[in-house]
Image: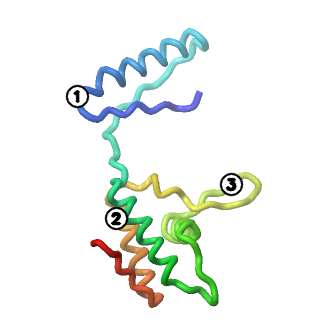
Amino acid sequence: MASRTFRIQGAAGVRPAFRAAWDLVQGLMRETGAGYELVLRPLKSKRSLDQNRRYWKLLLELSDVAWVGDRQFTKDAWHEYFKREFIGIEELPGGGQIGISTAKLSVEEFGNYMTRIEQWAAEQGWPLMLEGE
């Protein structure tokens, strides 16, 4: 069985999360008879919706102003490039590679990631001036 995560945000979520875990374990133990481990740890805050909107605006602006050779690239191409450049790569079956997901970054890590992109763009001669900020 793949691991399962039950997120608890606020007191109202405690009982439903534990009930769902209880129900899952009861069913699994009836089926397999195996033991399971329950781990509690602080919830890692993910990037905010505002950060996400800002990030995609940043990439859209870059796709509008940046020229590499005689080409421009889409915001999705820049997204993949920066994941590989600043977060790292993940090996795929068959030998391919993909950038590690930005969804794994905390709020602080994601903010630092965007700052690195802005610094990189300015160093290339494409200072980004996000409108509405």
Q: Say which amino acid is labelled 1.
A: Ala
- Where is 10 relative to 21, above or below? below
Residue 111 has which mark?
Answer: 2
Q: Say which amino acid is labelled 3.
A: Leu
User: What is the crowding at mark 1: few (fewer than 14 residues within 10 Å), some, or many (at least 20)?
Assistant: few
On the rendered structure, is 39 left or right of 70? left
Tell which of 41 and 45 is nearer to you.
45
Residue farthest toward the top in the current orientation of the protein: 30
Tell me the distance, in whole angstroms, between the alpha carbons under discs 1 and 3. 40 Å
Label 3: which secondary element? loop
In the image, residue 33 lies at what x, y percent?
Answer: 57, 12
Q: Earlier in the sequence, mark 2 or mark 3?
A: 3
Which residue does the image show at 72% across and 52% down from the upper left? Answer: 93
Q: Quadrant of residue 17?
A: top left
Residue farthest toward the front in the current orientation of the protein: 132
Q: Which residue is mark 3?
A: 92
User: What is the crowding at mark 2: few (fewer than 14 residues within 10 Å), some, or many (at least 20)?
Assistant: some
Q: Which residue is mark 1?
A: 11
In the image, residue 45 lies at what x, y percent?
Answer: 33, 48
Check if mark 2's residue and mark 1's residue have beta carbons within 8 Å: no
Residue farthest toward the right in the current orientation of the protein: 94
Label 1: which secondary element? helix
Which residue does the image show at 60% across and 12% down from the upper left? Answer: 31
Which residue does the image show at 44% across and 86% down from the upper left? Answer: 126
Classify the position of the N terminus by image quarter: top right
Tell which of 19 and 60 is nearer to you.
60
